[in-house]
Image (spheres, rainbow, N blue to C red):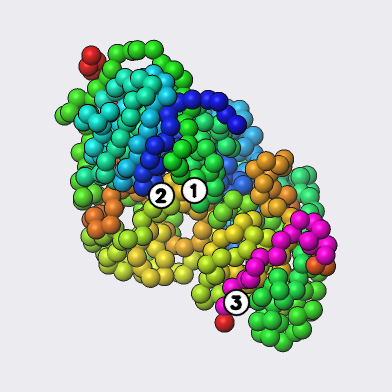
C-alpha cells in the first residue's frame, strides 16, 4: 500500500512503459537492457523538464495515454508526432508546460513516428529493479510491476514549484521519415557472408515486416545467405543484425535476448537504431557500411550537437 | 627481450560501435569456459577500479566475452590496448586459479516421469534405451554452467551424454512450463519461467532458477557444476513444485 501521489493513469494507451536510460550490469543473470528505443527523444524530454538525462519517464508507443495530475508539476512530451492536450486544449510537443493538481493530460495517436516520451520535473519516483526502472515486459522486470502501465496506476513524483518553461525551437527538432538509412559497422560473422551476399545486403531496400517490437525489427527483402548455420551462442550487442536461416535480417534492439547463435553480419549505429525505433510496418530501410571510426564520429557529432543546443525559455 | 604475446590466441573482433568480442576458441570445452570466466574476473576487477567509467558491461558465453564500452570516455583502440594488458597473464592465472576458486556443486532435484517429461519416450526410442536408462544417464554426470542468457535465469548446462543428446523440436512449444528440465543437442537446462521453447522436456525441477527477491537471485552461476537428482512426485510437490495442467504434446 502506497500513499505516494503523482500522476494517475486515466487511460493506459496502446503501450506505455516506464523507462530510464536502461539496465546495465545484469547480463550475467540474463537480463537485457530495456530503456528508451529513441534515446535522443527521451533525453530531450528530460532536458525540457530540467532533469538529469536518465530520469525516469514514460515511453508511449502509438499513443492513447491519458493522465490526471495529482499535484503541481512540469511536463514535456517529445518524439513521434502525437497530438497532446491539457484539459482539452491542444498543446505543442518539444516544450514544457506547468500542470496543476486535477489537470488532465491526453495523447492521441502518432501521425509521424511511433514512440513519444513524457517526462515530469524530477522524474517519476519508481523503485529500481536490478539498478534501473526500465520496463522489460518479456522479463517481467522494471516499472511498477514489470509490465506496461494500466488504468488506475499511480506514478509517483515530487510536487514542483513553478519554474520557467523551456522549448526546443522548431527548426532544431528531429524530423521523422518513413525511409531511413541504417549506418552499419560490418562485424561478427561478416566474413562468413560472401562478398556477393554483402553487396546484396548493402544495396537492397528492406521493408519493416509486421514483426517489429522492442526486442527486434524483422525485415522483408532480398534474402541473404551465410556460409554457416550458426555459431556457439555469444553476446548480442544493441543494433546487431542477425540473419536467420530464412535470410531475412532482424535488427536486435533494446529488449533483445542477451546471447544467441544465429550469424550476424554487422551492427547498426545507435544514432540510427533510434530512428529505426520510430518506424513501423511498411517503412523502408537501407543498410550502409561504415567503419568503426566513422561510427564513432557519427556518435560524437550527434552528442556534440545535442550538448551544443540551448533550449529557449518560453514564458 | 622478445617474448611471444601471451594473449595472442585471444582474437579481438568488432561487434558494434561500442562493443568488442573476445574469442577464446572456436570450440566449447570446460578449459575454454574456465578461461572465459578468468578473463571476466580480471576485467571485472579492473571495472571496480580504473576502468569503472570506460567499460559498461560484459556478456560471457561458451567461448567468448563481449565487452561493452563507454563511447563518451573511450574508443575501441584504447579498450583493445587495455584488454591486452589485463589479459596478458591469463594463461598463468588459469593454471593456478582454474575454476576451483568459486565453483560450487549445485544439486537440483528433478521429478522425471512421463507426466512431467513428455519427450522422454521420444529420446528413449531414438536411443534404443528404456525411459529409466535415459533418466539414469541424465543424472549420472556433473554438468558445467557454460552460459546464462536468452531469458532471465536460463543457464546453459553441458555436456549431455551423446546417447541422450536430442535435436530441438521442429515445431517449438508455445508454452514450456516453469521448471521444465530439457535437452537440446548436448545441452541441458531448467526453464526458469513459462516461455516458448523447442527443447525436449524430460522432467520438472521444483527449485526457482530466478527469484528477484532471494539472495542469491539464481542458485547457479557460470562455472558452477550442476548435478540432477531424481525425486518422487510427492517429494516434488512437497518442495513446492506444481504440475502444469498439461504439457503440449508435440508429435
C-alpha separation, residue under disc 2 versus residue under disc 1: 10 Å
Locate residue A101 relative to residue A96 in the image: left or right: right
Residue density around tag 1, few if under 14, some if 14–19, many if 20 or more, within 10 Å: some
The residue that label 3 is drawn on is B249
Residue A194: percent from the left, percent from the top? 34, 67
User: Comparing marks 2 and 3, which lies closer to the viewer?
Assistant: 3
Secondary structure beneath label 1? helix
Query: What's the magenta region?
Result: B234-250
Residue A57: percent from the left, percent from the top? 41, 32
Q: How many marks?
A: 3
Residue density around tag 3, few if under 14, some if 14–19, many if 20 or more, within 10 Å: few
Chain at tag 1: A
Secondary structure beneath label 3? loop
Residue A168: percent from the left, percent from the top? 24, 25
Q: Please tell me which of labels 2 and 1 falls first in the chain.
A: 1
The residue that label 2 is drawn on is A214
Residue A124, compared with residue A227, is above or below; it is above
Amino acid at each position: 500500500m502506497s500513499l505516494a501521489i503523482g500522476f494517475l493513469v486515466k487511460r493506459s494507451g496502446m503501450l506505455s512503459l516506464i523507462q530510464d536510460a536502461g539496465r546495465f550490469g545484469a547480463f550475467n543473470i540474463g537480463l537485457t537492457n530495456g530503456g528508451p528505443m529513441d534515446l535522443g527523444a527521451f533525453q530531450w524530454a528530460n532536458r525540457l523538464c530540467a532533469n538529469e538525462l536518465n530520469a525516469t519517464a514514460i515511453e508511449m508507443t502509438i499513443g492513447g495515454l491519458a493522465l490526471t495530475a495529482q499535484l503541481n508539476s512540469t511536463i514535456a512530451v517529445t518524439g513521434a508526432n502525437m497530438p497532446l492536450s491539457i484539459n482539452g486544449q491542444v498543446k505543442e510537443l518539444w516544450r514544457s508546460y506547468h500542470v496543476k493538481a486535477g489537470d488532465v493530460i491526453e495523447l492521441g495517436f502518432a501521425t509521424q513516428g511511433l514512440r513519444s516520451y513524457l517526462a515530469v520535473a524530477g522524474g517519476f519516483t519508481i523503485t529500481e529493479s536490478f539498478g534501473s526502472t526500465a520496463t522489460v515486459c518479456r522479463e517481467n522486470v522494471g516499472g511498477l510491476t514489470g509490465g506496461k502501465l494500466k488504468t488506475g496506476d499511480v506514478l509517483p513524483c515530487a510536487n514542483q514549484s513553478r519554474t520557467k518553461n523551456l522549448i526546443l525551437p522548431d527548426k532544431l527538432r528531429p524530423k521523422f521519415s518513413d525511409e531511413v538509412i541504417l549506418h552499419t559497422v560490418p562485424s561478427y560473422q561478416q566474413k562468413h557472408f560472401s562478398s556477393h551476399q554483402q553487396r546484396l545486403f548493402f544495396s537492397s531496400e528492406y521493408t519493416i515486416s509486421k514483426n517489429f517490437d522492442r526486442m527486434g525489427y524483422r525485415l522483408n527483402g532480398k534474402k541473404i545467405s551465410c556460409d554457416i548455420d550458426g555459431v556457439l551462442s555469444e553476446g548480442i550487442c544493441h543494433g546487431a543484425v542477425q540473419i536467420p536461416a530464412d535470410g531475412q535480417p532482424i535488427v536486435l534492439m533494446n529488449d533483445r535476448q542477451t546471447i544467441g547463435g544465429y550469424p550476424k553480419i554487422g551492427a547498426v549505429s545507435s544514432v540510427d537504431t533510434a530512428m529505426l525505433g520510430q518506424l513501423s510496418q511498411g517503412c523502408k530501410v537501407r543498410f550502409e557500411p561504415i567503419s568503426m571510426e566513422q561510427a564513432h564520429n557519427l556518435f560524437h557529432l550527434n552528442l556534440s550537437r545535442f550538448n551544443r543546443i540551448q533550449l529557449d525559455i518560453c514564458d | 627481450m622478445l617474448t611471444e604475446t601471451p594473449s595472442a590466441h585471444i582474437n579481438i573482433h568488432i561487434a558494434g560501435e561500442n562493443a568488442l568480442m573476445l574469442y577464446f576458441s572456436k570450440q566449447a570445452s570446460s578449459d575454454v569456459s574456465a578461461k572465459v570466466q578468468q578473463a571476466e574476473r580480471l576485467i571485472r576487477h579492473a571495472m571496480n577500479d580504473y576502468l569503472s567509467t570506460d567499460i559498461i558491461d560484459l556478456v560471457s558465453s561458451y567461448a567468448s566475452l563481449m565487452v561493452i564500452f563507454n563511447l563518451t570516455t573511450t574508443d575501441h583502440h584504447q579498450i583493445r590496448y587495455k584488454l591486452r594488458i589485463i589479459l596478458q597473464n591469463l594463461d598463468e592465472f588459469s593454471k593456478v586459479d582454474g575454476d576451483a576458486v568459486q565453483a560450487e556443486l549445485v544439486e537440483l532435484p528433478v521429478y522425471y516421469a512421463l507426466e512431467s517429461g513428455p519427450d522422454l519416450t521420444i529420446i528413449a526410442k531414438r536411443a534404443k534405451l528404456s525411459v529409466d536408462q535415459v533418466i539414469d544417464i541424465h543424472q549420472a554426470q556433473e554438468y558445467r554452467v557454460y552460459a546464462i542468457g536468452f531469458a532471465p535465469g536460463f543457464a546453459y548446462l553441458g555436456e549431455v551424454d551423446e546417447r541422450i543428446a536430442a535435436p530441438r523440436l521442429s515445431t517449438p512449444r508455445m508454452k514450456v512450463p516453469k521448471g521444465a528440465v530439457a535437452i537440446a543437442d548436448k545441452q541441458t537446462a531448467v526453464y526458469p519461467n513459462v516461455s516458448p521453447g523447442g527443447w525436449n522436456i524430460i522432467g520438472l525441477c521444483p527449485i526457482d532458477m530466478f527469484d528477484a527477491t532471494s539472495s542469491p537471485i539464481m542458485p547457479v552461476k557460470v562455472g558452477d557444476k550442476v548435478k540432477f537428482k531424481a525425486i518422487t512426485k510427492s517429494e516434488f510437490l512437497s518442495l513446492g513444485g506444481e504440475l502444469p495442467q498439461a504439457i503440449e504434446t508435440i508429435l
